[in-house]
Image: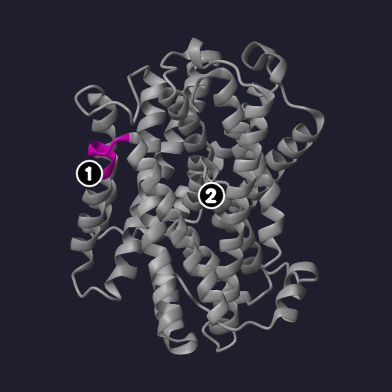
Amino acid sequence: MLGLGLITGAADDDPSAVGTYAAAGARFGYGLLWMAPFTLPMMFTVVYLSAKLAMVSGRGLFHAIRDFYPRWVLYPLLAGVIFGNVVEAAADLGGMAAALNLFVPAPIPWLVAALGVGVLALQCFAPYEVIRNVFRWLALALLAYVGAAILARPDLRQVLRGVVAPRMSLDSEYLSLVVAMIGTTLSAYLYTWQSNQEVEEEIVQGRTTVRQRQGASRSELRSTRRDVLAGMVVSNLIMFSIMVATGTTLHASGRTQIESAAQAAQALRPLAGDAAGLLFATGVVGVGLLAVPVMTAGAAYDIAQTFGWKHSLHARPRQAKAFYGLVALVTAIAIGLNTLGFNPMKALVWSGIVQGFSVPPLLLLIMLMTNDRRIMGDQVNKRGLNVLGWATTAVVTAATVTLVVVWLS
């Protein structure tokens, strides 16, 4: 019964995001716990609007942009999103391999290649329904972080204080982590994937053309709102749990500099017990197996929609050769960036800069399209949703400007 919103929310807590949240907890303890409830309404808004756009228009996000906006708008957005997806997929494969290496004594490049080939095989040879169900089960790996937080035995009063009365700072490192967490929770692949999966679900029901997929009832949109909200709540609960686990143990013991999820898992073992470290590492690998195909297939969806190529996980590789070729190419590049000695974690900074220039315009277009009666008919946004949507766009734009200023200074 778990819906698409859970898959999207789980993919948002990819290994790179886990590393960011672990770094926040280790460096500032409970000082950034307030970010979980702060980002929740923004995540819900952008993911729901993406789902709504797909349900009503019958198109994925880049398909809609191609049909209603000029190419000079489409192509730069595509370039930024693809670059971000490829680099983040590479970073996630590296993060998964490093976490797995804590328990499997094999060379990390071999683990990267095995993981990459495994997720590619799932996408190419498993039916869509199987892929969807595998993703749902992998999403449950996120519960490992809740277990890690409980095993850390936090002071609940201090945790509550970190949420409702945090000690904020204008320190550049504190602000950089705030910006990084906003960027991580609102990455472009989050809402492009949601829109594409809404289309795939329509295809499951036999609606194979745009005309057949157009339109959505109020009850369908209500159901999607509940599904997306549930997925985003779970996603933010995991963010919260990671910061609690690392804040309780690493920060309290003076281990304040954590650069990756694998490093956090290793550091947790002597402080909170082997079980906590094992749970943390399990979560990294489990959610990575979900997030990497979301990014690689997401990039293939976006490119195929831009150029009008056949694209669907329902099709077999021989029926959509360009689409599956793109999935394989993106996966190969992500593997190669690791095996060639490339440091994908450092490249996330570049990815953040590039996505920083593409995400605010993408959010702007989502807001414009979901208020356009040519596309949405009578299902244009109501006032409350518009307030949340425009506020989210403003916050993400401000975070992007701050990120670029910090990076250039």
Q: Position of residue 312 (x, y in %)?
A: 35, 27
Give the residue displayed 37% in from the left and 28% down from the top: 303
The residue that mark 2 highlights is 9
The residue tagged with tag 1: helix, strand or loop?
helix
Principal SS element in the magenta part?
helix
Q: Is residue 118 above or below residue 198?
A: below
Q: Is residue 326 magenta?
A: no
Secondary structure of residue under mark 2 = helix
Q: Residue at x 63, y 35 (%)?
A: 223
Q: Quick one: 344 or 186, which is closer to the camera?
A: 186
Whether 60 is drawn above or below 138: the answer is: above
Up-down relation of residue 224 to residue 281 (above or below): above
The magenta stretch spans which residues?
122-127
Q: Which residue is mark 1?
A: 121
Q: Residues within 10 Å of mark 1 (few under 14, many from 20)?
A: few
Residue 166 lies left or right of residue 99; in this view the side is right
Q: Which mark is residue 171?
A: none
Residue type, numbered disc 1: Ala
Amino acid residing under circle 2: Gly
**Residue depicted at 45% across the width and 70% down the height:** 259
The numbered mark, 2 or 1, whose residue comes first in the sequence reads 2
Residue 80 visible in the picture: yes
Q: Residue drawn at (68%, 45%), measured in percent from left and top?
A: 42
Q: x%, y% of residue 239?
A: 58, 62
Near-viewer residue (162 or 276): 276
